[in-house]
Image (cartoon, rainbow, N blue to C red):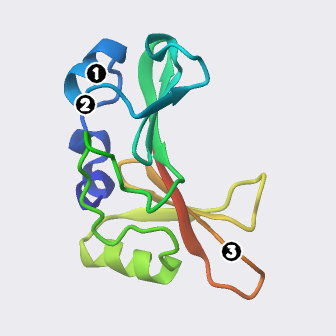
Amino acid sequence: MLEIARSGDGALGCMGLDHSALQDQLGLPTMWGPEDDVQRAHIWRYGDIEFHFHDWKVCLICSDHGELTDGGESLTINPWVVNAGLPLSDFEKALKDHSIEFEKTSPVSDPSMVWVVTQESVKFTFAQDSDSAPMRLAGWSLDR
């Protein structure tokens, strides 16, 4: 995840791939949907990592499942510090320690959430369980 935070899709090299090219790189997904036919599915999932297709090309890579970095048997992602529930303050410190520039914003639709967006447009989503709880990592995404 450190390399993904630092270089975006340069670390994965999957953005813009079609089904066939992604299959060549990672094999068949462990889950897919919403269509029943894997080759017509708009979402392929490897472990906890989702690849979303638009016009049959990967346009979004994300996870808001499990520990956030488990790519199943096909995709190995070193979690670095990323894990579900990581406090926002710990994540900000890790980014600063590695000289990764970022901005914090809140989505207009839900100002109780915080997005931390790295210089390579990787978005990490933080949320609270309650008003008094610290902000904790709930997911990440990379889109074009």
Which residue corresponds to mark 3? 128
Determine whether 102 is above or below 76 in the image.
Answer: below
Which residue corresponds to mark 2? 26
Q: In front: mark 2 or mark 3? A: 2
Q: CA distance from mark 3 to mark 1?
A: 36 Å
- Name the image quarter holding residue 56: top left
Q: Does residue 119 appear in the picture of this structure?
A: yes
Answer whether labels 2 and 1 touch (C-beta < 8 Å): yes
Mark 2 nearby-residue class (10 Å; few <14, some 14–19, many ≥20): some
Q: In front: mark 3 or mark 1? A: 1
Answer whether labels 2 and 3 touch (C-beta < 8 Å): no
Question: Residue 89's spot in the image, x, y percent?
Answer: 48, 82
120 relative to 73 in the view: left or right: right
Mark nearer the N terminus (3 vs 1): 1
Which residue corresponds to mark 1? 23
Mark nearer the N terminus (2 vs 3): 2
The residue under the point 75% across, 63% down is: 111
Badge 2 marks a residue whose secondary structure is helix
Mark 3: which amino acid?
Gln
- Name the image quarter holding residue 93: bottom left
Picture disc at residue 83: none
Q: Work out which quarter of the rendered image holds the C terminus and state it.
A: top left
The residue under the point 26% across, 53% down is: 77
Q: CA distance from mark 2 to mark 1?
A: 5 Å
Q: Residue furthest bottom?
A: 132
Closest to the observer, 32 or 9: 32
Mark 1: which amino acid?
Gln
Q: CA distance from mark 2 to mark 3?
A: 34 Å
Mark 2: which amino acid?
Leu
Q: Does residue 144 appear in the picture of this structure?
A: no
